[in-house]
Image (cartoon, rainbow, N blue to C red):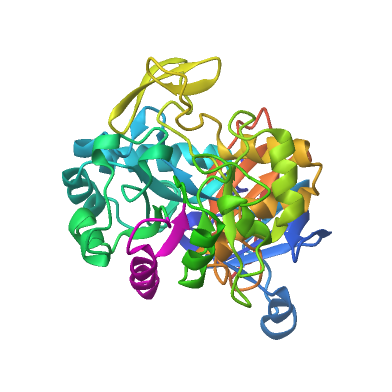
Amino acid sequence: MLSEHIGTGKPPMDKVLKLIKFNNCRILRNHKIIKEDLWVRNGKIIDPEKIFFDEKKQAHLQIDCHNAIIAPGYIDLQINGGYGVDFSYDVNTVEAGIVKVSQGLLAHGVTSFCPTLVTSPTETYHQVLPKIKKRAGGKHGATVLGVHVEGPFISIEKKGAHPAHCIRELDEGFKTVEEVYGDLSNISIITLAPEKQWAPETIDELVKRGITVSLGHSMGDLKHGETAVQHGATLITHLFNAMLPFHHRDPGLVGLLASSEIPEGRNVFFGIISDGIHTHAAALRIAYRTHPNGLILVTDAISAMGLEEGMHRIGQFSIEVRDKKGYIAGTNTLCGSIAPMDECVRIFKRATNCSLEFALEAASLHPAKCLGISDRKGTLNYGTDADLILMDDDMNIHSTWIAGDCVYEIDEHSMPNVSTQSVENYF
C-alpha cells in the first residue's frame, strides 16, 4: 500500500519525511495533463529545479505512480451531510458528525469542503455555528473551509426542502443577519435571495467581512441578480434548481451566465449538481457551453449519502430515499443528492463531453477561485498545498493526499500498480 516503505534502518519515515517525489505520473497543471514528476516538501508542492541545481538533494520517498493521473483534491462548496449525519439536525453531536463526514469524503477525493446548513431556527444557528470551526485537513479528514449557510433569507415560493416557518426577511439588513446567525466567524458562504428588501446593502457588509455571497432559492429576476453581483455577490446556488426557470424575456438568475451588466473583471460562479437527477444532461451542456469559467460542481449531498435507501433527515424534515433519489417524506419534492463528488465529476464529463482537464478543474480550481484560495488550493502549482488525488483514466480514486500525507488509499489488491520506495541515503 502507499503508506508502506522499504526499511532502511533509519527512524520511521513519518518522523523524518521531508521530500517526496511522485514519478511516472501525469499531472494536471495549467489546464493540461502533462507527463511530469511532482515534488512535495513539508506539505507544499515545490519547484524541483531548486532541488536539482541548488540543494542537490534526493527525495526521501519516491512514489512510482505507474502512469496514474495526479489532480488537485476536490473541493465541495455545498454538502449538507452524509453517512447518517445531517449538520442542521444533529445539533448536539455536530462536531462528531463533522469528523465522520470529513473522513468519509476522503474516499471520494474530497480534500476540502464547506459543511452546509439548510434554513433552520435561530437557536440552531447559535448552537451549531460555533461548533463547526475552520480547520486544516489530514488523516482525521478533509479540510473544513467554513460553513455554507443556505438560508434563512430566501424566497418562500422557492423554498424546496427548507421549512417555511423558519424563512426570514432582512428586516434590518445586516443587523438581522447578525441576530439570526450570531457569530459569523465560521461562515464562508451565505445563500440568500437577491430580491429581498435590504439585500444589496446586506451583501455589501458581508463581502466586507470576506464572506462569499451566493444567490439562490429565489424568485428574483435578472435585474435583481445583476444588482446583487454589482454589490459583490459572486456565486449562484445550484443553478436551475430553486429559482425561476429561464424565460426569453427575462432569463432570471440563469441570465447572469451571459449578462452584459457584470462589473469588469468579475466572474460569476455557479454551483451545479450533476448527480444525474437534479440537472438534466442537456441543462448541464447549456451551462457548460454558456459560461464554462464559472462552473463549479457541488454535491448538495444529504445525510443519506453512503447509506441504503430508507428514511433519513435534512434539517427540520424527514426524508425518504427511493430509487436513488431523496424526497421530503410523503412528497415528491427533491431535497439534495446522495451522489459523492467523484461520481458527480464522472457524470458531468459523460454528459457534456468536456475534456478530462475541465471536469477535474470544475471540482477543484473553480471552487478554489470562487473562495479566493486558489493561491494555495485547487491547483498543483508550485507553492500550493499538496492536496491531491491519484486516479486512473476512468477517474476512479486510487489515493487521496492532504498536505503531502496519504490520508486514503484503496485496498492494495485493487491497486497493484502504485508502489513506494524510500531512498537509502536521505540525510
Q: Which image quadrant for residue 197?
A: bottom left
Which region of the structure is painted magenta? Answer: 194-215
Q: Which image quadrant for residue 103?
A: top left
Q: Which image quadrant for residue 92?
A: top left
Q: Foreground: 371 or 93?
A: 371
Residue 356 is left or right of residue 317, and the answer is: right
Q: Position of residue 183 (x, y in %)?
A: 21, 61
Q: Foreground: 373 or 271?
A: 271
Where 77 sits versus 408, above or below?
below
Q: Indicate the quadrant containing the N terminus: top left, top right, bottom left or bottom right.
A: top right
Q: Position of residue 17 (x, y in %)?
A: 53, 62
Q: Position of residue 33 (x, y in %)?
A: 80, 57
Residue with the most extreme bottom position? 54
Q: Would residue 198 be counted in the magenta stretch? A: yes
Where 180 sits versus 228, above or below?
above
Where 321 sits versus 132, above or below?
above
Query: Who's the residue at 44% across and 45% down the image?
Result: 217
Q: Indicate the quadrant containing the C terminus: top left, top right, bottom left or bottom right.
A: bottom right
Question: How many labels were placed on the picture?
Answer: 0
Q: Foreground: 155 or 190?
A: 155
Query: Who's the residue at 27% across and 43% down the image?
Result: 95
Q: Would residue 33 be counted in the magenta stretch? A: no
Q: Does the rendering let one see residue 416?
A: no
Q: Position of residue 59 (x, y in %)?
A: 66, 65
Q: Does the rendering let one see residue 101?
A: yes
Q: Foreground: 413 or 162?
A: 162
Query: Who's the residue at 75% across and 66% down the image?
Result: 30
